[in-house]
Image (cartoon, coloured by chain):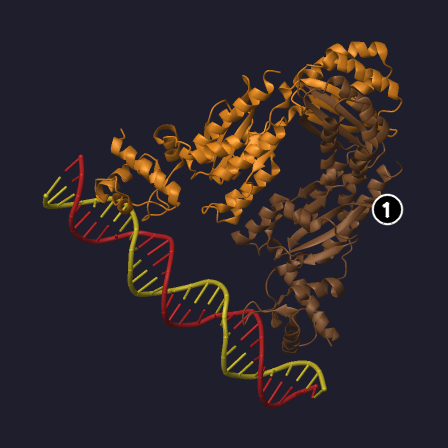
Chain colours: A orange, B brown, C yellow, D red
Amino acid sequence: MLTDRQLFILQIIIDDFIRSAQPVGSRSLAEKKDITYSSATIRNDMAELENLGFIEKPHTSSGRVPSEKGYRYYVDHLLRPKKLNYQEVETINSIFVDRVYELEKVVQKSAEILSELTNYTAIVLGPELKDNKLKKLQIVPLGQDAAVAIIVTDTGHVENRTFTLPEQVDASDIEKMVNILNEKLIGVPLSELHDKLYKEIVVLLRRHIRNHDALLSMFAEAVDLHANEKLFFGGKTNILNQPEFHDIEKIRLVMNMIDQEEGIYRLISGVPAGIQVKIGKENKNAAMQHCSLITASYSIGNEQVGTIALLGPTRMEYSRVISLVDFLSHDMTKALTNLYHNG
Amino acid sequence: MLTDRQLFILQIIIDDFIRSAQPVGSRSLAEKKDITYSSATIRNDMAELENLGFIEKPHTSSGRVPSEKGYRYYVDHLLRPKKLNYQEVETINSIFVDRVYELEKVVQKSAEILSELTNYTAIVLGPELKDNKLKKLQIVPLGQDAAVAIIVTDTGHVENRTFTLPEQVDASDIEKMVNILNEKLIGVPLSELHDKLYKEIVVLLRRHIRNHDALLSMFAEAVDLHANEKLFFGGKTNILNQPEFHDIEKIRLVMNMIDQEEGIYRLISGVPAGIQVKIGKENKNAAMQHCSLITASYSIGNEQVGTIALLGPTRMEYSRVISLVDFLSHDMTKALTNLYHNG
DNA sequence: ATTTAGCACTCATAACGACCGAGTGCTAAA
DNA sequence: TTTAGCACTCGGTCGTTATGAGTGCTAAAT
């Protein structure tokens, strides 16, 4: 139902608007060198595109602006991924040159570089810990009634939690317990720790330790909080550079969300593998009304461990940005798999 | 040289401007109920105050606005600290009710509460670690060539660092070394670790361990990074609520600085004890031109360990805010001393 | 000697109208 | 089917004109 020419016009309108942030009119289009037909023809096609909801007019006599539906169609069918240039590829690769073992640093740097390359806000949902396996559990007593529990995973991640000791437990009990746990739980994924603790370990404890229930619940608590992955940001304030965000109210909505982290987490956790593009209201979030979100997952081996996301205005440079996010996610997967997958 | 009436007028102008964010004129002042003289009199006094640089006019025929010098005088001589109301005291006290041992959580919560109470951006410079004493040092090997070093301090703080192992060291060497270090260094303040490592420990190592130099430098590295304290924020986007920050450029400057953390660190580290108020350009920072910064230090025992700061527009509600920061800093000192000072 | 009433003056802000121009839709000719 | 032509729309800009809150200054009142 849409002619090739109409699609071509749609594409050019969107490309143009993405570049200029200005509504585009039929005359200015007709003047472009790769357009051979007149402004009147374009007007007719534009009218049709508007009927179908791909573009809209901010007011009666202005040029056209892509609608969300327009962007959607563009992303799904029109856009051709821009090839990355040498500079971009090099910059991304530079993240992984020094063989740092600390995953968090790699992830943080990825977020920074991605935001630098795009001028949008980059968010990386850190490696999920639940698939990490316990490497070592340690309790360090602090004075009379407090202790810090430390958990080390096979990827070198360290989690710790301080708590008050229940009364009537003494150092030897704790030591015994730590020994038992280390003996039985090393290699167990964090996500299964809780269950194991209550199903297998509890019987052992009953045998060897007084006051096992208090200690156990304490450990369980220490072990539980690792469900939540961490978010890493780059270019948190980049939205301020976008001309369409001249209105403080809009800015506040977005910045607040970024600052709270929770909304962001809901947006990007649990996205499917591969590149995903959510445009404007598709994000089901009031603050994201005028923003788009590009996400891609990254893996270690075959295990999807985290997500890369890029947040910008709906008027995003999709063709370049999608290529970048795609490339980065594959690069990360490669590098991380290399580092951690052999074991 | 300034009459009492002139000072009174200055005070009212500033109070009024802080409340309304609008230039204040002689007529509106004269209508206030606690002012008995005419607008003409006020005009004369205003002219004098302007001569002396305490107030200024945005343009020829507008009301007056406090200058930095005016704010300075106000803060130093005119302001009377506002008594906190029950609600405010309760809110602050609530930070310390549950006896959490984790200092970081207390500090984070303080920043959040302070920003909530004030609608400005709160920053807390976390406890300096250099006075923390080593409680336990631990090395956990990760596979062949990497290991994570974990340092626990007497306040329950845990630092960790992953690194690649030098070649030709084996597990037993590491274990021996860890034992030596734990034996010799527990109770030593982190700030002295480096020195001790190179002066006392090195001789012991030479005796017991092959390849001690590589291992030593590795440890030194792991131990060194704790110089930098951490910053905790509350209400990072609160500056967006200020009417004088309607201009995106101004906002960007401030937000960028907040986001980078480094500039903030420079601003608030090393402030003297007690309440400090830096107004506008006094902060020697382009981004802070239109902002004021209130700082106060908090202590554990007699040891100053960190700083509380509040960042807002120069048109800040000084009287209330100074009381709040003062109260919070004392409350924190009290609570932390209670928790950690007995030892 | 102070204070105040009176008055001319200033200037940001809002309101108004004119006009421009980039844009549109529609019709009729190519 | 495409395009030239034309009337129409409507934001944006520019100058004009109030309006009003503010000022400084002078002279009268206290």
Quarter holding the N terminus of chain A? top left
Residue occupying the point 85% across, 26% down: B183
Amino acid residing under circle 1:
Asn
Q: Secondary structure at mark 1?
A: loop
**Which corner quadrant of the image does residue B90 belong to?**
top right
Residue occupying the point 56% across, 20% down: A338
The chain letter for the residue carrying disc 1 is B
Quarter holding the C terminus of chain A? top right
**Which corner quadrant of the image does residue A109 belong to?**
top right
Residue A26 is left or right of residue B266, and the answer is left
Residue B204 is left or right of residue D16, and the answer is right
Measured from the top left, where is residue B147 in percent x and y? 69, 23
Measured from the top left, where is residue D26 in percent x and y? 58, 88
Measured from the top left, where is residue B244 in percent x and y? 57, 57
Q: Is residue A273 above or below residue A2?
A: above
Q: Which residue is mark 1?
A: B302
**Nearer the observer, A4 or A248:** A4
Residue B216 in view (yes/no): yes
Q: Is residue D10 above or below residue A95?
A: below
**Nearer the observer, B330 or B29:** B330
Residue B132 in view (yes/no): no
**Nearer the observer, A67 or B146:** B146
**Which corner quadrant of the image does residue A3 belong to?**
top left
Measured from the top left, where is residue B200 in percent x and y? 84, 33
Q: Residues within 10 Å of mark 1 (few under 14, many from 20)?
A: few
Q: Is residue A6 above or below residue B51?
A: above
